[in-house]
Image: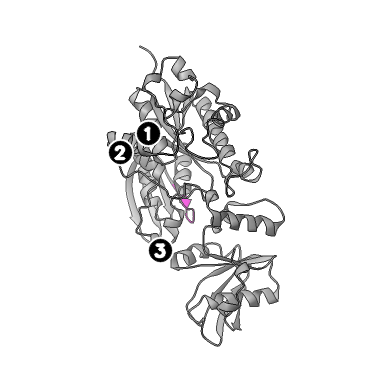
Amino acid sequence: MERFVLDARRLLCPLPVIRTQNRIRTLEAGDILEVVCTDPGASHDIPAWCRIHGHEIVETVVEEEIRIVIRVGG
Amino acid sequence: MTTQAKAVALISGGLDSMLAAKLMLDQGIHVEGINFYTGFCVEGHTHAIRRKDRDKPKRNNALWVAEKLGIKLHIIDVIEEYKDIVINPRHGYGANLNPCLDCKGFMVGKAREWMEENHFDFIVTGEVIGQRPMSQRRSTMPVVARESGAHDRLLRPLCAQLLPPTYPEEQGWVDRNKLLDLSGRNRKPQMALARQYGLDDYAQPAGGCCFLTNEHYSAKLRDLWRSRGEKRYELDDIMLLKIGRHLRPRPHFKVIIGREEGENRYLEGYRRQYTHLKPLSHSGPLALIDGVPDEDDLLLAARLVARYSQGRDAEQVRVEITNQSGQSRALEVKPFPDRDIPQAWYV
């Protein structure tokens, strides 16, 4: 299991979702991906995308920036 | 045991494509959704940027539809490839800079590529004959099927009974009798069907889901092309056309002025790419300059920015100008009087 960080700051939705989707495609089940973004829409869209694709949201922190921690599903 | 047929459904986030996918799920087809991001999609952007819209739901409608239907959704970035559709549409533009027929052919073509790569069997769209004046007419249905290369692997469940049988029908994967015969712009049958399925709260975008159908947006894109002497754009260009007040006082430069806090914050992200202005003596907007301004142009831009600051009625406003290298200086300027700003400057 490895941990990765994806910088999606300044990107507007759905680009943070697309970058997350494309990055997860290269990862293994159980890997952790931390997505850092600034578009408030991403805090809704990335979890929605994860739900329909079977990935787990471990943590969402909404401060000045948004950090979404995902555990890649099988 | 027979293998379950697999369909890739184009999901826009609107009602028609949602119903088309639902009809396939009802027939036991394995459905996954596909959604294309062109850069012109109305989805979310302005909601995310403008403070006044911050309370509006920020959901991505295509994702919402997928979750509602319980299907996977693949969102594909087609920003680069789509430029050719916008710049050189074979079938021309609609009322504005919307190349709807080329766009439909392109998207179904991309779905066909996805179908082939992922070993799916056919493509589903929510098209309805007569629904859209440019892209959804009886005469354009075969054009989309042909130009996309999808041919008879393209099924339009909402109006399939009005069209020749397709491959999935001929194979017996899909029962033609359970497909629909909708036509025209009346959306009541779709709304009734949505009620029947218990689907509510679906998106009903008043101006469609693409900025290119918007008259004001298209005017700004035309202006951009005119000023550059060629039809060309980058993603940042078309994103900035969605933001702020655009004034072009001279052919070789324009000023993009934030209209509120959310837009100012968004424009701040472009400070390293553009010469920008900000009032110092009064609160006011951030403005970017697109083009190559000379000293007189900068003075004029500063006066325009002063006009949109809290110092609009002051004798002098101090405006900071910062170039792309990050070098700043300040100018004391008299705000441009409203009456002296020619209407023609507003793009």
Rendered image: mark on residue B19: 1
Name the mark nearer the viewer: 3 or 1: 1
| Chain ID, mark 3 | B
Q: Position of residue B31 (x, y in %)?
A: 40, 28
Residue segment shown in magenta: A5-12
The quarter of the rendered structure image containing the N terminus of chain B is top left
Residue B265 sits above or below residue B41 on the image: below
Same chain, labels 3 and 1:
yes
For the residues marked 3 and 1, what is the alpha-carbon distance in whole angstroms?
A: 33 Å
Q: Position of residue A44 (x, y in %)?
A: 36, 49
In terms of image quadrants, where is residue B218?
A: bottom right
For the residues marked 2 and 1, what is the alpha-carbon distance in whole angstroms?
A: 9 Å
* Label 2 or label 3, whichever comes before in sequence order: 3
Looking at the rendered structure, the secondary structure element under dot 1 is: helix
Residue A51 sits above or below residue B305 on the image: above
Residue position for label 2? B199
| Chain ID, mark 1 | B
- Residue B201 is covered by the magenta coloring: no
